Image (cartoon, helix red, strand yellow):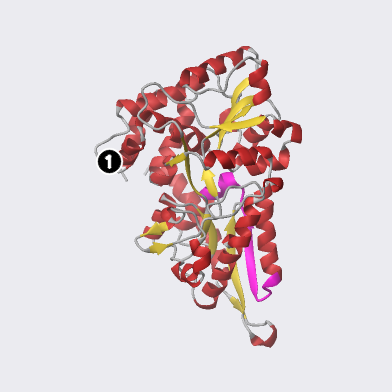
Amino acid sequence: MNKKTTMILSLVLAASLTLTACGKADDSTDKSAEGGKGKVTLTLWHNYSGDDQRAKTMRSLIEKFETEHPDIKLDVQAIPPDGYRTRLKTVAAANEMPDLFVMWPGVMTKEFQAGNLIQPINGLLDSKKEWKDGFLPGSFDGFTIGTDIYSAPIALSPTSILFYNKGLFEQNNLEVPKTWDDMMHAVEVFKSKKITPISLGNKAAWPAQSSILSSLADRVTGTEWFLNAATQGGAKFTDPEFIQSLQYMKDLGDAGAFQSGFNSLDNTQAEQYFAQGKAAMMIDGGWALTNIASTASTEAMAQMGATVLPSVPGGKGDPNTLAGVVGTGLGMSAKVSGEKKDAAYEVMYALAGPEAQKQVLESNQLVSYKVDLDKSKVTPIFAEVYELVNNVKRTPVYDGVLSSAAADEVNNGLQELLMGGSPESIAKKIQSAVEKK
C-alpha cells in the first residue's frame, strides 16, 4: 500500500468515525413531546448554502416546514456546493448516510442504489398522482432503476450555456461565435484588448467537464459514440474523435481563453467575474442564473445574452443542443423506516411539490415541472435562457453517465490539459479508468 492510499484511507476513516457518531444520535425519536407523541428527528443535508435566490428559497421552504411541523425536528447541515459531493461520498463509503440528502440523478443514484444506501419513493409518488403527473417527460429517468424511483427532481440543469456580454462584442465588432473558428477568433481579439475571453472557475475540477467538454465533445463525437464509450460498447476514449475533443479544449487553454488562476477559482467566483463585465463570455450551467439574479446589477444583466456552444468542423453531433440533466432531488437513506419514513415523505413533498416548484422557478432556477412562467417575476436573462432550453435538445453530461472514478479522471485530466497537458496521455488515463469500472 503506497503513502497516497494510506493517507486517503486514513482521511475516510476519520471522517466516517465523526459522521458515525452524528448518525447514531440522529436515529432517534424524542418521546417528550406533548401528549406523549414522539417527536421525529430527521437529518437533512443540502448544498443550498449560498446567497443566490434559489438557495435562499430552498432554505425558506425548509424553515417554513419546520414552523408548520413542530412534531418533526430537522437536523440540517448546509454544505457549500463545491465540497458537497465529496462529503456525501465519504459518508456513503462509511454507510452512514443522512436520513435525507440532496443527490444527483444518473451515476450517483445508480452507485448509491447498488450499495443499498437509498430506498425508492414510489409510495410517495403513487399517493400523489396529480403531483407525479405534473413533471415533464423524462424527469424521473435519471432517478429510476428498474421500476423504482429514488427521487423527485427540484430543478432542471442545462450545463453548457454560452453566456456573452453584448456590449463587449459590439464594442469589438464581433459576432457571437457560431463556429469554432469564430470562437477562436473572438478569443484572439479579446486577448489582444486585454479582456478575458471566457470566465472559468475550475477549482472543484467538474466545471470544465460539465459545462464545456460534455457539450463540446458531443459536437465532435455525437451522443451515440459517447454512450458506447462509457459502456465500452465498441468505442474507446482513445479514439481519434475524442482526442480531437480534448485538442479543442487544449486550444482554448493554449490561447489564454480563461482568466489567470482559473484552476484556483470556484464556480461562483467565475460567475461574479463575468457579471462584473470582466469577461466577454462564460460557459456555465443554468444554476448561474439564480446567482446572477442575486449579485449582478440591472445594467449588467441587460448586457447578457445566452446561446449554445459553437459547431465544430465535421462534427458528428447536433450543434443545436445543450448538455444537461434533470436537477438534483432529495434521496432517502435505506435505514429510514416507520414514523421517520412518513415524516421524510412530508419533507420531500414540501421541497419538491407544486408550490415549491413554482417558488424555485421564480427564484430564477429552471425546473422540470409544468409551471407557467410569469416573466415579471424573473430576470430578462433567465427568460431568455428559459426560451432557449425549450427550443433545443438535451445531450448527456459526462459525470451523469460515467462512474465516479472515470468522471474524476476526466475532471483531473482537464485541469492538467488546460495547463498544457497532452490530449493523448489524458485520453489513455480516462480509458483506463473506464475499463476498471
Please, is residue 293 above or below residue 150 in the view? above
Q: Position of residue 319 (x, y in %)?
A: 43, 30
Front position in the image: 262 or 390: 390
Asked if one can make out residue 275 in the rendered structure from this viewpoint, the answer is yes
> Residue at label 1?
232
Front position in the image: 2 or 433: 433
Pointer 1 local density, CA inside 10 Å: few below 14, some 14–19, many at least 20: some
Name the amino acid, label 1: Gln
> Is 389 displayed left or right of 431 in the figure?
right
Q: Position of residue 332 (x, y in %)?
A: 50, 64
Residue numbers of the magenta segment: 68-86
Q: Position of residue 375 (x, y in %)?
A: 67, 45
Locate residue 162: give its quadrant: top right
Mark 1 element type: loop
Q: Position of residue 218 (x, y in %)?
A: 40, 33
Asked if the magenta segment contains residue 76, the reply would be yes
Locate residue 111: give its quadrant: bottom left
Task: Tell me the quadrant of the picture where the N terminus can be found.
Answer: top left
Please, is residue 154 above or below residue 172 in the view? below
Asked if one can make out residue 3 in the rendered structure from this viewpoint, the answer is no
| Residue found at the far bottom of this picture | 35
Please, is residue 425 above or below residue 433 in the view? above
Q: Which residue occupies 56% across, 17% down?
A: 186
| Residue found at the far left of this picture | 234
